[in-house]
Amino acid sequence: MWFKNLRAYRLTTPIDFTPEQMSDQLEARAFKPCTPAQPLALGWVAPVGGEEAALVHAANGRYLIKLKREEKLLPSTVVREQLDEKVALIESEQGRKVYRKERLTLKDEIVQDCLPRAFTRSSSIYAYIDTRARWIMVDAASAARAEELLNLLRDCIGSFPVVLPQVNNAPIATMTGWLVHRSLPDDFELGGECELRELGEEGGIVRCRGVDLLSEEVETHLHAGKQVARISLHWDERVQLVLAEDLCLRRLKFADELMKENEDIPEADDAARLDADFALMSEAVTDLQNRVIEIFGGEAE
């Protein structure tokens, strides 16, 4: 339930549907496991409660959803070996060359033959829509995984216009300035990790871990022209994170004091505990996202 990463998207229009209406719309793409010949299955599952629970959980104007992903594991080496054997057999028996188009057809046949016997791997992604602050927050480090969730959401509810937030001050220049001028915002503290990058597509990258980010070692790289592309931070004694130039927040770690606030809820009452944890977590995440936008000069018009 506690997010490990955060990709935030700005809602460009207000939400005009209730949690119940949204839950009904998501039912059309409720999760179903892969069929024998299906390489990937995506669908919605209840974020709180058992299988019979609603597909949308609402609290304080925030709608929590959960996407389940199941994929067949078919190693490329296995497919390649079988393909090479089949091509070699055809060329040997028929005395002709197997060209690219035929190789692709043979490869598809091998994949379809192997899929029913392949192992499956399951994963899930949480997201919540903050109807008041007009964000959708996705627990995904990968942009591709976040877009996968957003695309399925659009398939279910129709129009769902969102954009990546744009800020007035360039993140790389701002984060570099924090170290060069030793001028971090008051409610943030430096962690012990950063990624420094030279300008240009072929510029070098230096990753610092477990070091003082204000040390002479890091300062030397900055004076040589490298800039901060990622940096680890502690925010407001509530959350640790790695902030990246794309404004994605990775490796979120919430303070123990925050996570223990619901310890008095009986362990047997899982639904109540998850509901309370979601309220705590979403409040902190929304506050953090708004603060991140603020330290980069606010959202661009």
Image: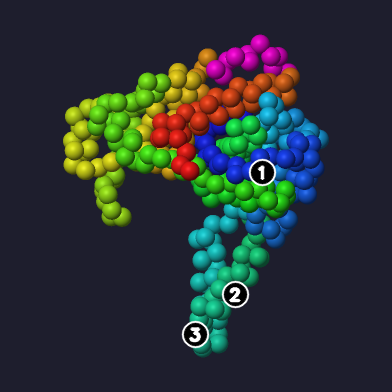
| Image quadrant in which the N terminus is located | top right
Residue position marked by numbered label 2 in the rendering: 105
Residue 42 appears anywhere in the view: no
Name the foreground residue: 221 vs 263. Answer: 221
Nearer the N terminus, badge 3 or badge 1?
Answer: 1
Q: Position of residue 13 (x, y in %)?
A: 64, 43
The kind of residue on which mark 2 rests is Thr
Q: Give the Cα distance between marks 3 and 2.
A: 15 Å
Q: Give the Cα distance between marks 3 and 1.
A: 44 Å
Judging from the image, what secondary structure is the residue with disc 1 in?
strand
- Residue 97's disc number: 3
Question: Which residue lies most toward the front here?
Answer: 301
Mark 3 residue crowding within 10 angstroms, few (<14) / some (14–19) / many (20+): few
In the figure, residue 15 lies in which quadrant?
top right
Judging from the image, what secondary structure is the residue with disc 2 in?
helix
- Residue at (64, 62) in percent of width and height: 114
- Residue 68's disc number: 1
Q: Position of residue 201 (x, y in %)?
A: 31, 55
Name the foreground residue: 193 vs 59. Answer: 59
Q: Position of residue 176 (x, y in %)?
A: 29, 36
Residue 234 appears anywhere in the view: yes
CB-based contact (under 8 Å), mark 3 and mark 2: no
- Which residues make up the magenta segment? 258-268
In the figure, residue 266 lies in which quadrant?
top right
Is 268 left, or right, of 140 in this rendering? right
Give the answer, above or below, for where 183 lies relative to 256: below
Judging from the image, what secondary structure is the residue with disc 3 in?
loop
Nearer the N terminus, badge 2 or badge 1?
Answer: 1
